[in-house]
Amino acid sequence: MYLSANLNTYLVVALFLLILGLYGMIQHRTFIGMLISTELILNGAGLNFMAFNRFLAPNPAVGQIFTLFIMGIAAAEAAIAVSVILAVYRRYRTSDPDEVHDLHG
Amino acid sequence: MILYQYIAEALFFAFILLVFFGGLLAVRSSILMHAVLGLAVSLLGVAGLYFYLGSPFLAMMQILIYVGAVCIMIVFGIMVGYTPNQVRVEGITGKNTFLALLSSILVFILLLVALSRTFWVPSASRMGDFTLSYLGESLLYQYCLAFELISVVLLTAIVGAIVLARGKKGEHF
């Protein structure tokens, strides 16, 4: 039984990507670090779609198209996130997410 | 024949190691540039896994879009927005490390248990194939609306990013 012909291998790799992204997201040091974690999580989702597409799905085009759409959404999200980070940096002069607040509640 | 399969398995293992250690570098590095480098390495590993999943086209798209566009954009974000003394982020063992470790390990165990108890059933019949022409056909016939919508989303994102990042006149970082 080869590792590359086993569905569970890909699922475990995708799970590792998910928990790495979760770890980086909670540990948040900077906005850019959180953006990087988001990209990791999105890639785990795409890998999951491709694995299920390869082994289980009735139509092998659906998973590939879905992964392509995830890539497009991730690119749009990264562009928006970088420009929002720039705007926040210009307004607050900090890169620490904990210091960006106007309301003290 | 057998030798080729062993080489393929070794390459597969190497791609998985790329994903693991690139992801670790992306999350744990205290220098943001190194974190982006780790992200790029991890995404390259995922592109290699796409080869093994029977879709070289997706692997190329992954390299083109993620490694070529998204990572470069994040590098631009770092270089434009952060002054050099802020590029190194202090306090990697901050207040949230314990919480982050706890929650991620809990999620890992939960999903691993769920994974080990699940029995996947393949679909009874498969239609279509993995070829690029079939993919393009279904992208232009069956999923035409989604294809157009995502181009609209990308256009909106570009215009929105320009408007957000431009700022007021005469204002500099």
Image (cartoon, coloured by chain):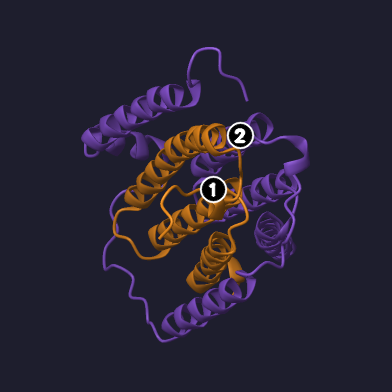
- The chain carrying label 1 is A
Label 2 crowd (10 A; few <14 / some 14-19 / many >=20): many
Residue A79: image tag: none
Mark 2: secondary structure: helix
Residue A80, quarter of picture:
top left
- For the colour orange, the matching chain is A
> How many angstroms separate mark 2 from mark 1 (CA)?
11 Å
The one nearer the camera, B151 or A90, is A90
Q: Outermost residue, top direction?
A: B170
| Disc 2 with disc 1 on a shared chain | no
Chain letter matching colour purple: B
Is residue B122 among the parts visible in the rendering? Answer: yes
Kindly tell me whether residue B50 is visible in this rendering. Answer: no
Q: Is residue A21 left or right of residue B125?
A: right
Q: Please name the residue that numbered disc 2 is placed on.
A: B77
Would you say B10 lies left or right of A5 here?
right
Q: Is residue B102 above or below residue B80?
A: below
Q: Residue at position x 64%, y 49% from top? A: B39
